[in-house]
Amino acid sequence: MRTRIRYLYRSSFCKVRVLLLLPTHFILLFAIFGLMSCRLIDNRIRGSYGPNPKTDSNSDGTPDSFGFVDKNDVALSSSILSEIVPIVGINRKVNIEVLGDGNPQYRVCSDESCVEEIRTWSADPETELISESQFVQLQLTSSASNSTSTQASLKVGTVTANWKVTTSVALALSNKGTWRSLSLGVSHTCGIASNSKAYCWGKDSNGQLGENDDGDNLDEDIPVDVDTSALTPGTSFVSITGGLDHTCGLASDGKAFCWGGDGSGQLGENADGDNLDENIPVAIDISALTPGTSFISLSAGAFHTCGLASDGQAFCWGNDGNGELGENADGDNLSEYIPVLVDKSALSSGASFVAIIAGSGPHSCGLSSNGQAYCWGNDFYGQLGEDADGDNLTEIVPVAVDTSSLDPGASFVSISVGAYHTCGISSNGKAYCWGRDWYGDLGENLDGDNLNENIPVLVDTTNLIPGTSFLEISAGASHSCGLASDGMAYCWGNDNNGRLGEDADGDDLDENIPVAVNASALSPGSHFISIAAKGGRSCGLASDGRAYCWGWDGYGQLGDSEDNDNLDENIPVLVDTTALNQTPSF
């Protein structure tokens, strides 16, 4: 007689199913043999013949629970990194899955420093794997709209964790006393308020405040209205940029204006070369632009200005003594009184500029549509970032910034141009600087050697909260500042006048790596959403729309009082909004 029997033995490491079709008298013997064999395998897998030290359900690839902390009030259209999360509780490699809004990215890391390349999930089961005690970090691009959430989910084995980032609340146009944006000149400051008006304050020796046509050119300790008589009725400024002794702005109808010093033609208003200073905004000559196009961004530098047109063409005008206009290879370096086209022969075929920045010194930089950074002009300190051989030759057309120090596959997504150094943020959330490092401007090290760098070097993040990274960076004259993904502001370099904003004791010691800006003056629950460094001071915009400045106040450029004391400030002070509150809102 033959008997059909199904035998099952289970353990954490051994599962045996045997279908028997045997004479009845062999059944008991076979069952005992199978049980002993499986028990033996079980014990050998465990590495001993004793009790199994781990007998939970994680053997099937189920990790311990994990999660991410949602982030609120993040900047618009920014790459946001999550905290770095360890994956534990699995004894084999398991698949991961990353889904969400837009194009969420991630990286699997061998340790908590998490320096591996950010990548996009591919749904390939052979490569999308994670092991016990590895770490994982997510990256999302925040929405371009206020008060909007972007979400991602990470599935490891059978456990899923969700993560959400939400952009800051939009400031209502009817709000009084708040700001939408700030821009720093060397000795003056400007901003666009929530009432759609432009204001400037500080030094006015050349009419750079744009406040009046009577020519008194008096410095202002608090914000004053920029004159808009040259603008089309019903339009207003939507962006503003401050240079050394001049200012420029874009109006809501796409027209571009400059005002202030014009000694080198930096206002771009005429071809006759009279170069007269202007106390109120005058229209920039656009005869060189492609018909039907207009400027979509402007950047005021030392004695030159640059702008990006709507067709991706870049233009500069003003002083060209060091090739900072990037216009030609013949080396004549003549000043230009109206916009001239920036040479783009170094750009990849089909690429165009997506950003262009005039430095507060004699160089300029730009970003192309394929993520490559370019700089041109004076390279005495290596601020062009183009080579490691240290020849530091002036370049009169754009040259590619060396990216050998960036992680494989990474590229620059933003760039800031200071007086003699340059900084940028890479696509995987790392900050780099290059050029002059006399005061620790590059933020790269603790040893204080302060050596100039001819190619980008990584900004030290020792003082940042683990899991955060820089979203924004700003290069000043001899210091730099950055905004981290958690809303904390940091500065480093020269602390003369208290421009780092780190302490109230007034020691004003230089810092070779980023130190946190003192945020005690900010309203409870608010944090910085943008930061800027230029000249001997820094300023930041908070999430509640209030503006703060700190550092040098020799001309009233901090905008904090109208008592004319003009005292330097070692920590952020609130910018006065008297003029904003007196202006009817739209």
Image: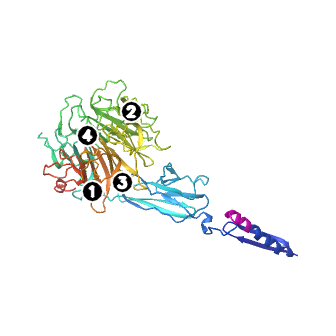
Residue 267, numbered circle: none
Residue position marked by numbered label 1 in the rendering: 545
Of the numbered discs 2 and 3, the one sitting upstream in the chain is 3
Quadrant position of the N terminus in the picture: bottom right
Q: In the image, 560: left or right of 405?
A: left
**Residue 290 seen from this side:** no
Q: Earlier in the sequence, mark 4 or mark 2?
A: 4
**Given contact means CB atoms under 8 Å apart, are the residues at marks 2 and 3 in contact?**
no
Say which element carries label 1: loop
Instruction: Work out which residue is located at the far right of the displayed protein and give it.
Output: 1
* Amino acid marked by disc 2: Pro
Quadrant into which the C terminus falls? bottom left
Name the residue: 27% across, 56% down: 545
Inter-mark Cα distance, 2 to 3: 30 Å
Query: For residue 75, which numbered disc appears in the image?
Result: 3
Direction from residue 271 to residue 330 in the image, left or right: right
Q: Residue 398 carries which label?
A: 2
Segment colored magenta = 39-48
Q: Quadrant location of residue 45? A: bottom right
Which amino acid is tagged 3? Ala
Counting every numbered tag in the picture gives 4
- Alpha-carbon neighbours of circle 3 within 10 Å: few (<14), some, or many (≥20)? many
Q: Is residue 294 left or right of residue 406?
A: left
